[in-house]
């Protein structure tokens, strides 16, 4: 069984004002097939955690470790992490002019698998995944994320999740900016990916709304760069009632 | 005197470590344009872009010093033979598949169409005009869409003049590729006549040998309700300067002037573009994109847009983007916009020169694509973005492969 282990992770971000510490010792273990919701107020470091796992160059790891089945993830380049089985569904997917989605997907699949996918099966896989995500077939020939609406970009992320079949996926506020229909479609995609491949999921969200459609096994509340409380589903329900106030300085006082 | 003049000069020198990016944008409201129009120089005579001296006689132009406005960014010492010397103006080998609605033949200097497209504005262009004996005439008359490739790879390495006429008859619909390769020490004038209601896409590919030098001036006249796309693709050659000008001469004319260039070490690739909105209800788009890689790689883009006094309800936009891939490169980008009527739909310009977008790189890498391949994808995409607008899958594939080959050359 695959395990993603994060131990005492400390991360800072490069800003114009210099280096700013964000994560102050995060401990988290995700096993294959588990869904962990990471919840927290704005600025608590949720997205930093996502980017640090993926290896974004703007973030510097100052201490701690990330391992995937014992392998040192932090020693890997961004693309090596993806090939090792990690996937980040981004909050703001990037537009890439002049590169068609189909070319991009095939190139990524080839890189992940180490060989080009068999053409017929691949085209069928892409088409049926797109259909299930209610994406018009024209999206295959459009440039990556170019001119896509917010919801279309998120579906495109989940399309990649379904096709690239990672072992662990970090979903960074995949629910933000989605209307309820799009939220259902995207959630179905995530649940489907989990059923088919049994991947482990770190679901980062500000709101409890998406947890109606994707059932978390564990809920972690993130405050000021570390996990302040953990529990099961019931913790999310409590957050829905109370909000984050009790975790914030004013709530404490 | 012009009603309003906007003239912005941006010259940027950018390297990956320097992280220089320049962005200038203008928007199309009259108030915004006029409020920007602060550059009237009392001491300098006002000269609108279409008021430059023109002549077909080389002797009418003084010797080029390299300080002239239209030569100062060009390495004139590398093209002296073309500016001053005698030129061979005879016919050269041309390969073109015959097809219905297409006529390709050599004509002499008395052909009635010569001079209808435009008249030289600089000495090299006039030298070619004075020196050509035979002109290559491509006449397009088919109303069904036709595609024609005119392959020219045997210009030779002795100084040569060429004259080319591309005439799209009214309501014809064609795509013509001037596919230039091999050795060249050549200066050429290309006259393009786009008849009423015609659709013409003219692509000129410069994929010459490494030591080739090539100067070209394209003069296009676009008729009523005609659609003209002009595409400059410059990849190979030591000095390649292609200056296209297009006059949207009749109401409803639509002109898109597009370009892609990839400058390697020591290569000088230049384009001075002029789009003239002469008639009302004309639409113009200028979009050039370039990549530079290697020591001494140099590109020059000057984009002049003139909206004449009669060109009401004009819609115009021009932009240039440069991607600098290594140290030691230089991209000059100079958009000029001149507007002589306030009654327009919109006019704008933009220019940006910068390094690689790291977020695009991160996105591709986070999907498992190795860095080198991700870079190739991004650069290829950046440049092909322009080619995609031509709407020819064959051409897109071919130019894609040519750009791949440039990238595979790597920083030298």
Image (cartoon, coloured by chain):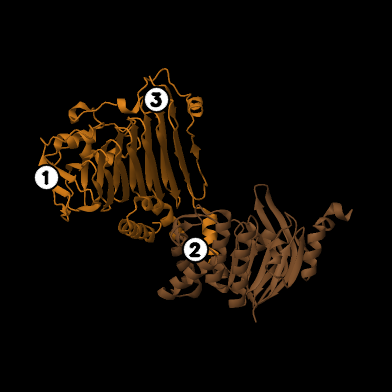
Chain colours: A brown, B orange
Q: Residues within 10 Å of mark 2 (few under 14, many from 20)?
A: some
Is A233 above or below relative to A101? below
Secondary structure of the residue carrying tag 2 is helix
Q: Position of residue B371 (x, y in %)?
A: 49, 63
- Give the label, 2 or 1, closer to the camera: 1
Quadrant the N terminus of chain A occupies:
bottom right
Q: Residue at x 37, y 21 (%)?
A: B46
Rendered image: mark on residue B371: 2
* Quadrant of the rendered image containing residue A42: bottom right
* Alpha carbons under labels 2 and 3: distance apart: 49 Å
First in sequence: mark 3 or mark 1? 1
Q: Is residue B203 among what the camera can see?
A: yes
Q: Position of residue B163 (x, y in %)?
A: 18, 41
Regarding mark 1 in the picture, which secondary structure is present there?
strand
Above-or-below relation of A132 to B327? below
Q: Mark number for residue B106?
A: 1
Position in image of residue B387 (x %, y %): 36, 52
In the rendered structure, the answer to whether residue B262 lies left or right of residue A32 reads left
- Please state the chain letter of the residue tagged with numbered disc 3 in the rendered image: B
Secondary structure found at label 3: loop
Residue at image coords 51%, 62%: A135
Sequence-wise, the earlier of marks 2 and 1 is 1
Q: Nearer the viewer, residue B211 or A85?
A: A85
Task: Give the crowd class for mark 1: few <14, some 14-19, many >=20 residues within 10 Å.
Answer: some
**In the rendered view, does B11 fall on the left or right side of A178?**
left
Q: CA distance from mark 2 to mark 1?
A: 50 Å
């Amino acid at each position: 069984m695959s395990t993603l282990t994060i131990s005492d992770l400390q991360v800072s971000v490069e800003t114009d004002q210099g280096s700013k510490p964000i994560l102050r010792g995060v401990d988290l273990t995700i096993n294959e097939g588990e869904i962990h919701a990471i919840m927290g107020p704005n600025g608590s470091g949720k997205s930093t955690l996502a980017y640090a796992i993926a290896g974004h160059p703007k973030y510097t790891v100052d201490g701690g470790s990330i391992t995937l089945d014992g392998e040192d993830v932090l020693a890997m380049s961004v693309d090596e992490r993806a090939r090792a089985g990690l996937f980040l569904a981004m909050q703001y997917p990037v537009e890439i002019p002049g590169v068609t989605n189909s070319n991009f997907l095939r190139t990524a699949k080839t890189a992940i698998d180490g060989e080009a996918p068999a053409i017929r099966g691949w085209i069928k896989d892409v088409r049926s995944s797109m259909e299930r995500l209610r994406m018009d077939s024209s999206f295959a020939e459009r440039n990556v994320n170019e001119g896509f609406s917010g919801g279309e970009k998120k579906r495109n992320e989940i399309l990649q999740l379904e096709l690239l079949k990672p072992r662990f996926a970090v979903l960074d506020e995949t629910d933000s900016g989605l209307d309820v229909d799009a939220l259902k479609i995207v959630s179905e995609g995530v649940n489907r990916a989990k059923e088919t491949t049994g991947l482990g999921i770190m679901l980062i969200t500000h709101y409890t709304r998406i947890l109606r459609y994707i059932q978390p096994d564990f809920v972690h509340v993130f405050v000021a760069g570390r996990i302040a409380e953990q529990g099961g589903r019931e913790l999310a329900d409590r957050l829905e009632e109370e909000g984050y106030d009790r975790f914030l300085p004013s709530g404490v006082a | 005197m012009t009603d309003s003049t906007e003239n912005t000069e941006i010259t940027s020198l950018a390297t990956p470590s320097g992280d220089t990016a320049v962005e200038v944008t203008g928007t199309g409201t009259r108030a915004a344009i006029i409020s920007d129009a602060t550059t009237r120089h009392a001491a300098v005579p006002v000269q609108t872009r279409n008021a430059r001296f023109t002549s077909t006689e080389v002797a009418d132009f003084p010797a080029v010093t390299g300080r002239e406005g239209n030569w100062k960014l060009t390495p004139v010492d590398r093209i002296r033979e073309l500016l001053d010397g005698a030129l061979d103006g005879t016919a050269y080998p041309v390969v073109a598949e015959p097809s219905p609605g297409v006529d390709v033949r050599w004509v002499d200097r008395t052909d009635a169409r010569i001079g209808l497209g435009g008249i030289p504005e600089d000495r090299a262009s006039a030298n070619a005009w004075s020196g050509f004996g035979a002109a290559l005439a491509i006449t397009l008359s088919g109303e069904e869409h036709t595609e024609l490739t005119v392959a020219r790879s045997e210009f030779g390495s002795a100084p040569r003049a060429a004259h080319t006429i591309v005439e799209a008859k009214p309501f014809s619909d064609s795509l013509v590729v001037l596919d230039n390769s091999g050795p060249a020490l050549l200066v050429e004038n290309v006259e393009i006549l786009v008849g009423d209601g015609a659709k013409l896409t003219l692509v000129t590919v410069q994929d010459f040998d490494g030591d080739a030098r090539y100067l070209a001036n394209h003069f296009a006249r676009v008729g009523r309700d005609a659609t003209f796309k002009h595409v400059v693709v410059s990849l190979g050659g030591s000095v390649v300067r292609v200056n296209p000008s297009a006059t949207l001469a009749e109401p409803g004319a639509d002109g898109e002037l597009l370009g892609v260039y990839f400058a390697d070490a020591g290569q000088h690739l230049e384009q001075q573009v002029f789009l003239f909105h002469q008639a009302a209800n004309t639409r113009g788009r200028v979009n050039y994109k370039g990549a530079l890689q290697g020591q001494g790689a140099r590109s020059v883009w000057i984009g002049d847009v003139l909206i004449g006094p009669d060109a009401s309800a004009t819609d115009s936009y021009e932009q240039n983007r440069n991607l600098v891939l290594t140290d030691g490169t230089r991209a000059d980008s100079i958009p000029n916009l001149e507007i002589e009527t306030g009654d327009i739909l919109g006019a704008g310009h933009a220019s940006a020169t910068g390094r690689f977008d790291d977020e695009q790189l991160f996105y591709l890498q986070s999907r498992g694509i190795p860095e080198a391949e991700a870079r190739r994808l991004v650069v290829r995409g950046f440049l092909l973005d322009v080619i995609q607008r031509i709407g020819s899958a064959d051409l897109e594939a071919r130019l894609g492969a040519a750009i791949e080959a440039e990238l595979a050359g790597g920083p030298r």
